Amino acid sequence: MANDEMKKTSQVGEAKAKEPKKKTSYISAKESRRITKFNRKITKKLEHDREEAGKDPAYYTTRMRDPNNVVEFDNMCTYFFSDVGTVKAVDGISFDVPKCSTVGVVGESGCGKSVTSLSLMQLLQRPSGQTVGGEIRLNMGDGTALNIVNTPVEKMQELRGNYISMIFQEPMTALNPVFRIGRQVNEVIELHNPEMSEEEVKARTMEMLELVGIANKEGVYEMYPHELSGGMRQRVCIAIALACRPGLIIADEPTTALDVTIQAQILDLLQNLKDKINSSIMLITHDLGVVAGMADYVVVMYAGRVIEKGTADDIFHHPAHPYTIGLMKSKPVVGKKVEALYNIPGAVPNPVDMPNYCYFRDRCEMHCEQCAGKYPPEIRISDTHVVSCYRYIDEGTVLGYPKTVDVEGLLNG
Amino acid sequence: MAEKTVQAHDAYSAELFKDAEKNPENLLVVKNLKKYFPIKSSFFKMTIGNVKAVDGVSFVIKKGTTMGLVGESGCGKSTIGRTILRLIEKTEGEVFFNGEDIFKLSKAELRAHRPNIQIIFQDPYSSLSPRLPVGEIIGEAVREHNIVPKEEFDDYITRVMEACGLAEYHKDRYPHEFSGGQRQRICIARALALNPDFILCDEPVSALDVSIQAQIINLLRDLQKEFGLTYLFISHDLSVVEHISDTVGVMYLGNLVEYAETDKLFSKPLHPYTQALFSAIPVPDPDYKMNRIILEGSIPSPANPPSGCKFHTRCKDCMEICKYCRPDFAEIEPGHYCACHLYNDPARSAELSKIMDEMKRAEAEKAEAKKK
Ligand SMILES: Nc1ncnc2c1ncn2[C@@H]1O[C@H](COP(=O)(O)OP(=O)(O)OP(=O)(O)O)[C@@H](O)[C@H]1O
Ligand SMILES: Nc1ncnc2c1ncn2[C@@H]1O[C@H](COP(=O)(O)OP(=O)(O)OP(=O)(O)O)[C@@H](O)[C@H]1O
Ligand code: SF4
Ligand code: SF4
Ligand SMILES: [Mg+2]
Ligand SMILES: [Mg+2]
């Protein structure tokens, strides 16, 4: 309500200031009311559907396509019903996280990496954020799988921390500013090890803090989050995430706030832990150096879609998609001085209003005639390497087009 | 005894950048800056010690140049930044901005300076007001300080946003609707919109993908060329630091351990910590095998730092003297400063050996007294 009012007054102010050459970025009050009404209806329906589906395990139990995967994303769509319209943050992505391996997810800032991981954790900001289509299959190890999209909240709470755990991009969002660090780590350990005594819990907390390289661990135990440096907060989050030996670790930019020596130490720690307890890692990061060092498979995203995926060797040595090629070119390298860094020209299209051709076309230096047609399909160009780009249409097998969801239709149908 | 070496060290540092503030070429002069955070006991709220977050740091940034600041996480980089901007009070030391002592400014004078000195925070999440739409977050201070005439305001904000990789349609949205990297760009736009002379960039690009990162870095460089902006650039990404900085300082546990022109530092790092740091830079090639210098031992606590050279517990070149005396931050080669006993000249070596012998004797006497 307050938002609407604010928007109206600011619009009035602006209209007065200069009427003629105003670009159409602001939404009329009527349009805004329509959007609000639509959002209320659709989120209500989606919440209701989910609740129904959650009542019967048959609706959320499925099978893995390949039992060697821990997670399979299958045309998953996650949208935000926001005040300015429907933001298709993730629109029909498919990729697998195989057992005991590390999958690196890279891509333009804002392309939907965090939203993908939050969908898997069911931690989207609801009701505005909703997974509206596709499946996320989580392997339960007993021949069955859960479809996370329909899994009820109570079941999810059991899984989070125990089975999947997440290192968040912004540590301050994961830490509670009013509690001391020690208490916050203790809580997680207690929750998952109810049999432990108070001393054992504290000892384990200390051990975890030591493991992530926190020096002053007795001091930090008593501190509040604001008293820690950026990197220390991030390491506390890592300690919390690793405290309970999860089968799948989602690490969203786990080391951006850390210097390279501690980064190396943390990455070693993740790698060792993964080998020791046979877990898998989904590693989201902008640091191509880190991805190259850690990942077995790499997924490249752009504007809410997967545009290329393959083994680390495929992506780093034979990048195929023009965006991936541009990304590799933009990275500054120590010892190679250049006047200006290369950057991909142009900007991502508005997620509320995506074009119906290749999302990268307006920035693509290699576009050809076909690219004006519909969004390119996924094309398999080797056993492990898949790319969405018309340049390879004659070289590989076409696998299919990413699915999208017609939200208006959803409401009516 | 330890006190004595510290005093000798402080006196030495004070000499180093003497009168640097009087040179109009220097925009920022930091002399022997210290910031200690008191540790309070949980029972009586008594101070039982100090976290020596910044423990005697001196450097100079010339107008129109960029200084990169790198170092172990938690070594005090952000604290230096926050103290320079007087967001927190110093413990000791002096900071001159354009020849003026920052710590002597009154509240009102400081406010007048504010638009000139901007900061891009490390944690964008906590520095953006959740209740304001993005256009307002960026524009608020622009209006307050009358940076552009009223009728140009809208276009101006749009231009700044576009330069930072944001689009006009973002103006109406609220911070929580953005990704981590987009939020960081909002912070950058907010700082740049005020036309500052100096920007403290605390990890400004680490949340961004490499292409946007390149765009922002190119933008910062262009602004510098055009308007002579000065930056202090804190980052863990050494390839970015190498690209953007004219000089680089390397910190360890509250101290600057090495400081030189970028080319010099990267081609010939002198300090053993710098060498270890450079050996751990990840390379974007899955076949590349790194030759990392592994730092042995655990990271010491800033509340109780090791005696002598703070790095001695983990240094591969540690000598006896390192455990007793704190190394001077000395000019080893013209413009190349380093704090390490490996590079002592013979005269200073002899002097320090004497101090060490004295300390040893005192130690032995103490032990003897204890026995009795
Ligand atoms: N609560 C929300 N409401 C509306 N839009 C949102 C919301 N959260 C995210 N988005 C949008 O979804 C898109 C994807 O965001 P996401 O956080 O997944 O990006 P990301 O790939 O993690 O980027 P980064 O690397 O910058 O963290 C962005 O365009 C963002 O603006
Ligand atoms: N308000 C505070 N109270 C107590 N200690 C603090 C406070 N702020 C910072 N510290 C301590 O000061 C030290 C330096 O912190 P600072 O944030 O400057 O590190 P940094 O070099 O920026 O690290 P990073 O690279 O991880 O951001 C840390 O040990 C931290 O715990
Ligand atoms: S499909 Fe065409 S426009 Fe899109 S990335 Fe490939 S070449 Fe470029
Ligand atoms: S002074 Fe000694 S311990 Fe310190 S860095 Fe130099 S050699 Fe290593
Ligand atoms: Mg993110
Ligand atoms: Mg910091």
Image (cartoon, grey):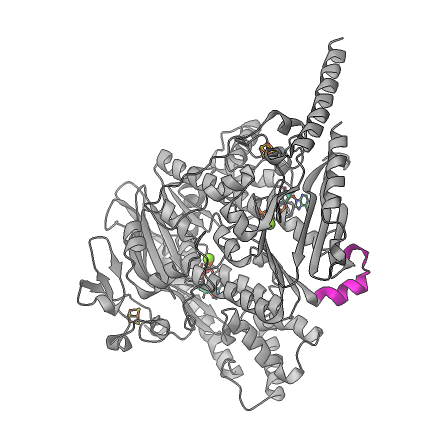
- Vertical placement of residue A274 versus B121, above or below: above
* Residue at the extreme top of the image, as rendered: B372
Q: In which quarter of the image is residue B320?
A: top right
- Give the residue at x 49% y 53%: A169
Quarter occupied by the N terminus of chain A: bottom right
Is residue A240 inside the magenta stretch?
A: no
- Give the residue at x 61% y 76%: A6
- Give the residue at x 71% y 73%: B145
- Confirm whether residue A270 shows in the render: yes
Residue B9, position as x, y percentages in the image: 72, 37
Magenta part of the protein: which range?
B102-114
- Confirm whether residue A77 shows in the render: no
Residue B72, position as x, y percentages in the image: 56, 43
Ligand 4 quadrant in view:
top right
In front here: A152 or A113? A113
Is residue B103 inside the magenta stretch?
A: yes
Q: In which quarter of the image is residue A80?
A: bottom left
Residue B240, position as x, y percentages in the image: 50, 55
Quarter occupied by the C terminus of chain A: bottom left
